[in-house]
Image (cartoon, coloured by chain):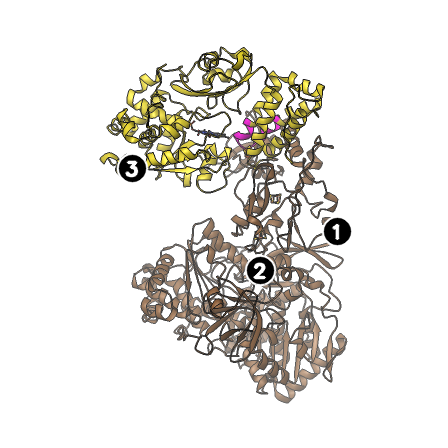
Chain colours: A yellow, B brown
């Protein structure tokens, strides 16, 4: 597939507005402004664009809810928190080609009727912060942002807000809490964000990549855009593939590319010619899969059928020498650290599981620990307050399903067969 | 709204409004376990113990955050639910220290209860438990985070109800602890909301630590807090006649306070058991007290009073009742004075200020009481809080104001000459020069008229009243008022605009108005402001005067006043005297009596020869301590009832040991006219007796026996006191009644004058006087003498709790004033006035306006009366002693 979203990432100085415009940047604004906002929204709806942040909610529908609420101002927020281990696919639009995001946001804001915009940026992206701010300033200077953009009635202000290093703040409602200066935690719903989002006003939160796609939809039409990829998950997608590969990195593919293509063609196969043990297909909060799934298409439905999720499209590849218990322990260390502490199941459950996994990796595992792990996962999954907890159990549950023998080997041997150890906090 | 039909555990339930599953289940007596849910707080949905099964949903849902919709079918104890609860509890208990045997919450702990019901017998946890040191940053509370279930109720109640934001959930994940940011609890007001609201034993009272167990309580009485005039409902728990603790209403529904208390009520409870309590009647012989017995002492008092009465006439005898006595006691004392003695020389300590407010409201609207109720201040869209620090003096009214601001988005205008702890909630703070409060109020009225923001419809119906008020306010232009008060003219206009445009808007005021010169006229001006803006008779509007002590309003209501009979009937009215005289079978004296200040002056002049003082510490509470003591010493005979050997009792010839509120029955009437019952939680301590019983005994000895049992007295009050008609102990059961009570509707009156105001009295021409600047060359500061949140006089000096927080008097000073005088925090300063001086440590406090020294009025060793003089305001004869010019130097 020809690159669409990453087309210009290798163009020198594409972060500069002149270079960007020389490469066809910001023309979607003219197209959009010539249309009624309703028609822009209609076009996006027709394209079938689904959110790229992990939940794959239809973008047009989310916008529609917000448009229907007669309260102003409305806000559009680009979710650039990108906190999930394995995920780095939004980075090019934050650090290299920022105008593509700004352009997408302006068009989207026009369709929604939003007058205020925020880019909620992962705190650990300092380069992105500088790049985005410079780009925003350039856009203001050209009247592409601010009052009466390009002489129209439409005004839109855009601000970059840096996160403070909490994964949960990537979740849309926690993001808004954090943006408002509060502790980043999931919000009780209702009220919903379409009516009471940021500062209690109607708000749309979209992933960076979702918004980037919008200007392409407007430029080339919903039909063209919708023809890419599969019917239920159309469009191009940036896959971030990492792990034991010869060529890890970002690859833009049409939705529906197979796992095998991603690993063996784009990624250049497993490093050192080793065998594949398994993959985590969409970021650590998605279930691991085995090589049996190599011919599976990377789209929403196929991954769901496989008992996993496409998530953010962050594919992590593990070779045959990987210790699964170690990987799961490492994933749990992340979730334990990131659990916000609000709800009992996730707060206590992730902590307990982390302790059990570390003990197991270090030789103190017992068979009954496997039951405890399964029970705790069940308790969290059924009873936790927000999706972070639900995601936290996925590595454990899926590894118990596909790699139970590795746990048993640890327990029987009284040590990690690969000789690894888990660092234990005190 | 259409009813919602749901099914809970097979029981069909009809709901008239949408509600969550926990509340809906409660309707049919089903308890859904919960930790973090609390009906008064925002939904948190964190603890996850409330999981229930909803038919058709694959996973359990949280009962607290799920609103029931039509047709919903819920199971609260199904197999799935129990499995979920077991799972959550197992996690909840992982790190719990399981130290129930030494935890004061044992026996009333939600975690313990749920663990019994759903928990596993044994934990599967074999790792190390989290160890968190107990947090002792708070003088009254311990925070034990090993026991915490992270429900965040403490944090939320501190923010959402108390409005003080002391606590936060620090850190995240399994490292979360509930504590103050950086350990700084300096904003804590020790209300104990967090303590009472913690479902487990993670927050404990240091006073109650290892004192008792719930099943130790042998007597429990729902009663009324004896401190301020908010009149909080609370429960006193005792064992073997010792107070164990005070607990607040768990249903958050009763009385004016609805579950809230302040530090005084919640922690100031141990004075009834103080070993300084008086236990036996004392009679002074040759300058020394000698222990006597009741018969002898009563006979002696009756004899001496009779002697003086026959020698010098009944008007040579006067009586005063304090602010902590019950309505019944006040009633008995005034009846005793008017019948057995035969004089109108009877007064009560509302004379220190509140009486001005009552007289003014009566003059303006015909009723001597607050027009509204405390609770519905929360509905106001603007609040003018003037001359009252609601957060300190009457904290429950303060909570209602905070609720208006925090929940209702109301604008709060805080007007004060001194420090005011409500300022942090205000949208506008007006700091006027002490003494110019009247000009400010007049300026607001002027501004309202000038911009036609008054209620024009009302004006059409009340032209003459409006004309009068308009004329009175004429000269108070913003420029003039600005010069007098020191407040920029723009700010005055802005405040007037905010107040006049908010519907409804309400006024809350207190001693900063009433205890100053022209307190009557100033109170009247506030009443006029409420009236011309159309706020009288509206819920959430009106005007709320704040009495200082629990018994003040009631003592006035039942006639412990020299010019008024019960129910504010005038002594000068022959008809009323006749009616009451008929009831009491006595001819009532017709000359109005003396107020407390006049009595003391008359004692000094030798005109008053005997005084009968019940529960009032005149030698401490009145201004000009030196002369007051001198004058009282001149009395031929002084009788004092008190629970402690107060400064006044020391001067007495006979001292009767009185019972505290914890040992007796009776009623208090709070600032909102709510008559409420107190009930004994212990036997009489030592040899103490209720004041009413003592008064009746003396009266009987003087030939006029009276019933003193409180319930009987209340029946008599309801007959003799028109505003208390229909009020009996039966009607008071279940939360008290705001007088007037309407038998037909079985209810009191929350909002007075809802049908409009009828007629004004003829003394409504009173002005606000000239607020001449108090501070001058010699005495460049103004002492602002006011109450502290932690103290209340004689009683709190003998309580541990409040003294653990604030144990000594400090002179609050603005940092710039202090640095100008080379005074550092903690330095001893001399506060000197024309009458005397005080030495006390300075506390540098930027909340104190420049030019003001803040002096607390309750500490034994620092008596504020030392630096004030006895000046009686002509209208109400109230001592003018709220502000006093002083000089401050470093000692
Ligand atoms: C724990 C958690 C973390 C998340 N982190 C991100 C993130 O970093 N970036 C993102 O775009 N969406 C993230 N999401 C998803 C957002 O909640 C939200 O669904 C998304 O921003 C919506 O945008 P979209 O519809 O364009 O995908 C996260 C969700 C959860 C539960
Ligand atoms: S699942 Fe619970 S503890 Fe975990 S992040 Fe969400 S709310 Fe916080
Ligand atoms: S005692 Fe009151 S003010 Fe202090 S932390 Fe608790 S709730 Fe907050
Ligand atoms: S201290 Fe008590 S109220 Fe506060 S979070 Fe812990 S358990 Fe809840
Ligand atoms: S009571 Fe529902 S989650 Fe705590």
Instruction: Determine which of the numbered discs, if any, sits on residue B231 in the image.
Output: 2
Instruction: Specify whether disc 3 shares its chain with disc 2.
Output: no
Q: Chain of mark 3?
A: A
Dot 1 corresponds to which residue? B216
Dot 3 corresponds to which residue? A140
Q: Nearer the viewer, residue B540 or B62?
A: B62
Instruction: Judge the density around disc 2: few (<14), some (14-19), many (≥20) Cα neighbours within 10 Å.
Output: many
Image: magenta residue range: A377-391
Q: Quadrant of the N terminus of chain B?
A: top left
Taking the image as shown, residue B687 lies to the left or right of residue A240, namely right
Q: Chain of mark 2?
A: B
Distance between the alpha carbons at the discs numbered 1 and 2: 27 Å
Place of residue A384 in the rendered image (x, y in percent of width and height, measured from the top left) = 57, 31
Place of residue B533 in the rendered image (x, y in percent of width and height, measured from the top left) = 37, 60
Q: Chain of mark 1?
A: B
Residue for point 57% across, 33% down: A337
């Amino acid at each position: 597939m020809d690159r669409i979203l990453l087309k210009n990432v290798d163009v020198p100085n594409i972060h500069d507005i002149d270079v960007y415009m020389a490469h066809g940047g910001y023309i979607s604004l003219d197209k959009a402004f010539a249309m009624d906002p309703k028609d822009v929204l209609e076009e996006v709806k027709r394209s079938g664009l689904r959110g790229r942040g992990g939940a794959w909610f239809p973008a047009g529908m989310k916008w529609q809810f917000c448009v229907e609420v007669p309260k102003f101002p409305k806000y559009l927020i680009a979710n650039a928190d990108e906190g999930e281990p394995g995920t780095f696919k939004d980075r090019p639009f934050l650090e290299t080609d920022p105008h593509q995001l700004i352009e997408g946001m302006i068009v989207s804001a026009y369709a929604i009727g939003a007058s205020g915009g925020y880019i909620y940026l992962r705190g650990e992206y300092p380069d992105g912060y500088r790049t985005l701010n410079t780009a925003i300033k350039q856009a203001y200077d050209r009247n592409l942002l601010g009052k009466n953009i390009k002489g129209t009635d439409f005004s839109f202000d855009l601000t970059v807000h840096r996160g403070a290093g909490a994964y949960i703040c990537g979740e849309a409602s926690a993001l808004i809490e954090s943006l408002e200066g509060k502790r980043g935690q999931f919000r009780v719903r209702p009220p919903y964000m379409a009516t009471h989002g940021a500062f209690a006003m109607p708000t749309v939160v979209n992933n960076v990549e979702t918004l980037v796609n919008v200007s392409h939809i407007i430029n080339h039409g919903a039909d063209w855009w919708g023809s890419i990829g599969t019917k239920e998950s159309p469009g191009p997608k940036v896959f971030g593939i990492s792990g034991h590969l010869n060529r890890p990195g970002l690859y833009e593919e049409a939705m529906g590319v197979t796992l095998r293509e991603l690993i063996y063609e784009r990624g250049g196969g497993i490093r050192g010619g080793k065998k594949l043990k398994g993959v985590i297909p969409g970021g650590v909060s998605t279930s691991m899969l085995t090589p049996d799934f190599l011919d599976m298409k990377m789209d929403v439905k196929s991954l769901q059928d496989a008992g996993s999720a496409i998530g953010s499209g962050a594919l992590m590849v593990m070779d045959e020498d990987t210790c699964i218990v170690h990987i799961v322990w490492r994933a749990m260390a992340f979730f334990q650290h990131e659990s916000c502490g609000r709800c009992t199941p996730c707060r206590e459950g992730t902590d307990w599981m982390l302790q059990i996994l570390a003990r197991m990796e270090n030789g103190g595992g017992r068979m009954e620990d496997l039951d405890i792990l399964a029970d705790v996962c069940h308790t969290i999954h059924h009873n936790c307050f927000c999706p972070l907890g639900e995601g936290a159990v996925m590595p454990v549950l899926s590894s118990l399903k596909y790699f139970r023998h590795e746990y048993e080997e640890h327990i029987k041997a009284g040590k990690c067969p690969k000789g690894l150890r888990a660092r234990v906090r005190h | 709204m259409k009813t919602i039909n749901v099914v809970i555990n097979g029981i069909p339930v009809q709901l008239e409004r949408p509600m969550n599953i926990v509340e809906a289940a409660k309707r049919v007596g089903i308890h859904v376990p919960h930790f973090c849910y609390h009906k008064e707080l925002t939904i948190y949905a964190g603890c996850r113990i409330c999981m229930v099964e909803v038919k058709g949903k694959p996973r359990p849902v949280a009962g607290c955050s799920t609103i029931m919709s039509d047709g919903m079918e819920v199971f609260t104890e199904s197999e799935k639910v129990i499995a979920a609860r077991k799972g959550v509890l197992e996690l909840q208990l992982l790190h719990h220290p399981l130290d129930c045997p030494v935890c004061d919450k044992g026996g009333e702990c939600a975690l313990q209860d749920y663990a019994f019901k759903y928990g596993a017998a044994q934990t599967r946890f074999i790792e190390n438990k989290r160890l968190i040191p107990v947090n002792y940053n708070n003088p009254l509370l311990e925070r034990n985070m090993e026991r915490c279930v992270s429900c965040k109720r403490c944090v939320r109640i501190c923010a959402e109800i108390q409005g003080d934001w002391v606590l936060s959930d620090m850190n995240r994940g399994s490292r979360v602890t509930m504590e103050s940011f950086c350990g700084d609890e300096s904003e804590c007001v020790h209300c104990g909301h967090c303590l009472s609201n913690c479902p487990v034993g993670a927050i404990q009272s240091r006073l109650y630590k290892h004192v008792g167990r719930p099943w130790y309580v042998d007597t429990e009485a729902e009663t009324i807090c004896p401190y301020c005039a908010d009149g909080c409902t609370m429960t006193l728990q005792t064992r073997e006649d010792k107070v164990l603790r005070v607990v607040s209403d768990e249903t958050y529904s009763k009385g004016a306070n609805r579950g809230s208390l302040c530090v005084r009520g919640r922690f100031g409870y141990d004075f009834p058991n103080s070993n300084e309590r008086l236990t036996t009647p004392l009679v002074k012989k040759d300058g020394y007290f000698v222990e006597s017995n009741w018969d002898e002492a009563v006979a002696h008092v009756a004899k001496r009073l009779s002697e003086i009465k026959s020698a010098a006439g009944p008007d040579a005898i006067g009586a005063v009742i304090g602010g902590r006595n019950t309505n019944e006691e006040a009633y008995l004392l005034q009846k005793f004075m008017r019948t057995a003695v035969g004089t109108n020389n009877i007064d009560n300590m509302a004379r220190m200020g509140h009486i001005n407010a009552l007289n003014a409201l009566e003059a303006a609207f015909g009723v001597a009481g607050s027009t509204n109720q405390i609770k519905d201040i929360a509905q106001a869209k603007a609040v003018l809080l003037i001359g009252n620090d609601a957060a300190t003096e009457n904290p429950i009214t303060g909570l209602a104001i905070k609720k208006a601001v925090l929940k209702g988005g109301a604008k709060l205008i805080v007007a004060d000459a001194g420090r005011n702890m409500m300022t942090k909630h205000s949208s506008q703070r007006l700091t006027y020069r002490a003494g110019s409060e009247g000009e400010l109020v007049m300026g607001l009225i002027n501004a309202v008229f000038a911009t036609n923001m008054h209620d024009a419809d009302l004006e059409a119906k009340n032209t003459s009243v409006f004309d009068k008020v308009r004329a009175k306010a004429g000269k108070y232009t913003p420029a003039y008022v600005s010069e007098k008060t020191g407040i920029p003219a723009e700010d005055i206009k802005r405040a007037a605009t905010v107040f006049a445009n908010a519907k409804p808007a309400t006024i809350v005021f207190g001693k900063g108005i009433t205890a100053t010169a022209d307190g009557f006229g100033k109170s009247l001006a506030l009443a006029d402001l409420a009236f011309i803006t159309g706020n009288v008779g509206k819920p959430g509007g009106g005007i709320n005067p704040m009495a200082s002590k629990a018994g003040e309003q009631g003592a006035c209501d039942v006639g412990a006043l020299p010019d008024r009979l019960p129910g504010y009937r005038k002594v000068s009215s022959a008809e009323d005297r006749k009616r009451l005289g008929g009831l009491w079978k006595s001819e009532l004296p017709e000359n109005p009596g003396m107020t407390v200040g006049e009595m003391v002056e008359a004692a000094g002049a030798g005109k008053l020869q005997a005084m009968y003082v019940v529960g009032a510490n005149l030698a401490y509470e009145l201004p000009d301590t030196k002369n007051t003591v001198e004058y009282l010493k001149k009395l031929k005979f002084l009788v004092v009832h008190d629970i402690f050997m107060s400064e006044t009792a020391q001067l007495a010839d006979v001292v009767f040991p009185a019972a505290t509120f914890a040992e007796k029955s009776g009623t208090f009437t709070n600032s909102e006219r709510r008559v409420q019952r107190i009930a004994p939680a212990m036997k009489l301590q030592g040899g103490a007796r209720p004041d009413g019983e003592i008064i009746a005994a003396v009266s009987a000895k003087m030939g006029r026996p009276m019933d003193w049992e409180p319930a009987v007295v209340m029946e008599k009050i309801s007959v003799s006191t028109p505003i208390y008609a229909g009020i009996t102990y039966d009607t008071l059961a279940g939360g008290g009644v705001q007088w007037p009570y309407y038998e037909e509707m079985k209810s009191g009156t929350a909002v007075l004058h809802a049908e409009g105001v009828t007629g004004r009295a003829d003394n409504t021409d009173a002005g606000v006087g000239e607020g001449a600047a108090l501070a001058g060359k010699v005495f460049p500061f103004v002492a602002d003498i006011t109450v502290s949140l932690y103290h209340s006089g004689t009683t709190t000096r003998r309580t541990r709790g409040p003294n653990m927080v604030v144990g000594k008097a400090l002179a609050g000073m603005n940092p710039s004033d202090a640095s100008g005088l080379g005074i550092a925090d903690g330095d001893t300063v001399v506060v000197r006035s024309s009458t005397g001086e005080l030495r006390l440590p300075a506390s540098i406090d930027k909340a104190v306006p420049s030019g003001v020294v803040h002096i607390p009025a309750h500490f034994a060793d620092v008596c504020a009366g030392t630096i004030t003089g006895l000046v009686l305001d002509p209208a109400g004869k109230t001592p003018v002693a709220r502000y006093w010019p002083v000089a401050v130097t470093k000692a």
